[in-house]
Amino acid sequence: MSHFFTSSILTATVATGIALAAPFLIAALGETIGQRSGVLNLGVDGIMLLSAFTGYYAALKTQSLPIAVVVGLSVGAILGLVTAIVSVSLKAEQGISGIGVYLFALGFSDLLFLKLVGTPQPISQLHAVGIPLLDRIPTVGGMFFKQNVLVYVAFLLVPVVALVLNRTTYGLNVRAVGENPAAADSLGVSVTLIRYSAVIVGSMLAGLAGATLLIETGIFQENLTQGAGFIAVALVYFGAWRPAGVMAGALLYGLTAAVILAWKGLGIIPLSLSDLASTAPAAITILALLMVARRFRQPAALGKPYERGG
Amino acid sequence: MERRRVIEWLALPSAAVAALLVGAVMIAALGASPITGYRALVTGAFGGSYALGATAVKAVPLLLVGVGICIAFRANVFNIGGEGQIAMGGLAGTATALAFPGLPTPVLIFLVLLAGAVGGGIWGAIPGAFKAYFNVNEILSTIMMNLVAVQLMNYLLAGPMVDKTSGSVGGLIPQTRLLSRHSWLPIIVPGTQLHLGVLFSVLVAVAAYFLLWHTSFGFRVRAVGLSREAATYAGMPVRRTITLAMALSGATCGLAGSMLVFGSISHRMVTDGSLTGFTGSAGFNGIVVALFGGLNPLWTILSAFVFAGLLVGGTSMQVVTGVPSDLIVALNGLVVVFVVAIEYTRRRARIADAAARTAAPEPEQAPPEHAVAGAGVEERT
């Protein structure tokens, strides 16, 4: 146990935890936007999977990670449009339609993977970029300021999403249609348009999260996400629909996972118990949900399709 | 026939047909013939007694999960935790068989199935109670419970429950030893895989139907599902009902887990590290099956058989055309999306119909017009 607290290992563990948190954070921020507009998108994991695969395929063909990211964002936008049509226009039960999108993308991504990629090859790595000066700070620099670009993007998105939601007219409209769509509608706000845009932007972030997860993993495999998208949805509840809260949740999740990885590596957790220890992030999330559930209120119109006069 | 009825009866088949058409386009896009593919699928699933037996066995976990989903969804609780509940049921049943290998066959089979139901039931009751008493969203908690279950399964099968004689150079294989012959579900049609579990799961579905529509508990489940507020106002024990509905839902999923172990060909519990490896995604596919069965356990029997056919036939299609059987998973997802999307059209037709009725009152009593628990699939009893 004692050598866990040596500074180099601690630094590496925190750095890993932050990197692990990034895909969860991006996906959860996207889900936050959608949920604040009143739409529960449970297909996040599916969107992440299909974006990760298409990004992987694009990276294999072009050897370009930026193109992989763009492809991931685009696939996210397409699936977001589908989700919006089903949830907003066709007024489907969102909890179930999301599972449908998830199953479709799970099957489809694996189908394409098996059919299009013969022998899986790793894609090129994204190297850590130090932020000048800040990365020189002892310990802290190594923890926070020597990450890959996508990690910085993830954490920059936190204030951006918070600002958009809280300080812009668009954000006000998003919150209005999520809380009281009838009132927003009577003031001339298009509930449909706001919800479509929020779901599509949110799904694009899910696509970015998929691409980020892929790039951090370096290779695609069947069911790459292992439920990461569902955890992202849980983090939105955990964070009480606020970007900063969501970030806290993602960090808790990522750091727990990183600590367990490190303890396994150091032999603090014996191999025979390593699977048992891996239950910790999910178990902690359940307990956290238990504690926050009674304290915070979800957007009043969450999961409820809007019908005029209905 | 009224417009409502027409839409009512065409909705589900048209969702299936639409999904199959998309599937045909996908098969063609992958360079194979859709007709050859679907023909191989149908023959593989329903052509001959062996295929039918395999389909019936495949339907067992789908049906049991589907029945559990019916119970939970009727209470307006979305149980997405079938995967984890199946695994916990399988583990509880397996542990029982490992602990009492010498018991006589009927006793041991009864005990392993009971243990499966209890194991899955506990795994369902926890998120149920969390929802009922602490207002924790059950979709999230059941998914988290899945993530805990998979690691528990990997831990138990590689550790305390591992077959110590399976040793090889790379360490032990994460599986149990061959389970006691007394725990095997007997084959009821020689020359096929059709085992006792097939009959038993149909009985469970029938029992669930009676539970939901002919007992006061079932009435409470449906009342809570339609309106929690109204049920509270009527003095029903809402929280206990929600917890119990989830416990029962988990129990049928756990039973499915036991059936998967004791009706398997290997008669061991094995893990490849993922839940899907053990469940075959039955926890998710069972949701599709239940929705397609209109959240009625009796229709779910038929629905489970059809979807099991798709899954079994998908493998034959893969052999003949080279299109991976994952296509079926994707199509199942599409069916779900189409079913819930069509539901809106059905609801509108129903409302239009009710309006027409009010304008020109008819002598007979209109059937209850409610969008049912969550899925909003109308009762077809």
Image: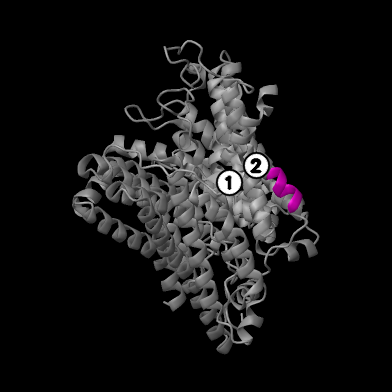
Looking at marks 1 and 2 on the same chain, the residue that comes earlier in the sequence is marked by: 2
Q: Residue A28 placed where, x, y %?
A: 58, 55
- Colouring style: one colour
Q: Residues within 10 Å of mark 1 (few under 14, many from 20)?
A: many
Which secondary structure type mostly characterizes the magenta part of the structure?
helix
Q: Nearer the viewer, residue B259 or A308?
A: A308
Going by the numbered disc 2, the residue's amino acid type is Val
Report the chain holding disc 2. Answer: A
Q: Residue A132 placed where, x, y %?
A: 55, 49
Asked if disc 1 and disc 2 are in contact, CB closer than 8 Å, the reply is yes
B103 over A240 or under it: above or below: above
> Disc 1 designates what residue?
A145
**Residue interval drawn in magenta:** A286-292
Q: Residue B366 placed where, x, y %?
A: 58, 75
The reply to whether residue A199 is visible in this rendering is: yes
B287 over A17 or under it: above or below: below
Q: Residue B273 placed where, x, y %?
A: 48, 31
Going by the numbered disc 1, the residue's amino acid type is Phe
Q: How many marks?
A: 2
A71 over A224 or under it: above or below: below
Label ID, residue A140: 2
